[in-house]
Image (cartoon, rainbow, N blue to C red):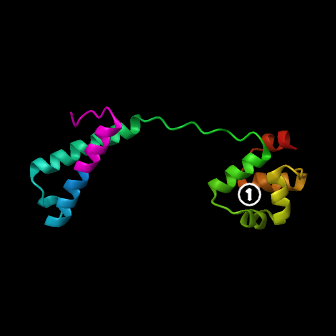
Amino acid sequence: MSSTFIKSKKEFQEVMARIEQILQKSTQIGGFDKLSENERATLSELSLAAENYEDSIPLMPMKSPNTLAEMLKYKMYEKNLKQKQLASLLGISEAFISGLLTGKRKLTLDLAKKLHSKLDIDASFLLLSA
């Protein structure tokens, strides 16, 4: 395997294991500067190869929210909020949030304004969701 070009996940894992070995050795002997010139060059080359491999992996496309419930769930995930925290942030009851998430409650103009200002939800999305 050429350390310059990683072609598979298996090769990537092997490179990462080798990097870890060199880093462990560096820790044991008192620092990076105590490694041999060859080990430092190898570490640099392997690190660059690993970075290039990681950069070549396309990210999974994220599904865009189509409903208000999906958008609220997405924003809760994005901001690491629980329903109770979201309700508090928006100044509404947990029951109302629950109703929005299940589709049993409708969006109000006042809530649309809060969702736009506090969660940065696009106004046109909110109008289409009303």
Residue 50 visible: yes
Residue, disc 1: 118
- Residue 119 belongs to the span the image colors magenta: no
Indicate the quadrant where residue 123 lies.
top right
At label 1, the amino acid type is Lys
- Residue 4 belongs to the span the image colors magenta: yes
| Magenta-highlighted residues | 1-18
Indicate the quadrant where residue 92 lies.
bottom right
- Residue 24, compared with residue 54, is above or below; it is below
Front-lying residue, 43 or 60 = 60
Residue 92 visible: no
With 130 as the anchor, is 50 left or right in this view? left
Percent x, y for residue 26? 18, 60
- Residue 95, compared with residue 119, is above or below; it is below
With 84 as the anchor, is 16 left or right in this view? left
Percent x, y for residue 57? 43, 36
| Image quadrant containing the C terminus | top right
Front-lying residue, 72 or 120 = 72
Q: Residues within 10 Å of mark 1 (few under 14, many from 20)?
A: few
Percent x, y for residue 126? 81, 44
Percent x, y for residue 77? 64, 54
At 27% from the left and 33% from the top, the residue drawn is: 5
Count all numbered tags in the image, as a single digit: 1
Q: Which structural element holds mark 1?
A: helix
Indicate the quadrant where residue 9 lies.
top left
At 84% from the left and 42% from the top, the residue drawn is: 129
At 81% from the left and 58% from the top, the residue drawn is: 98
With 58 as the anchor, is 35 left or right in this view? left
With 50 as the anchor, is 59 left or right in this view? right
| Image quadrant containing the N terminus | top left
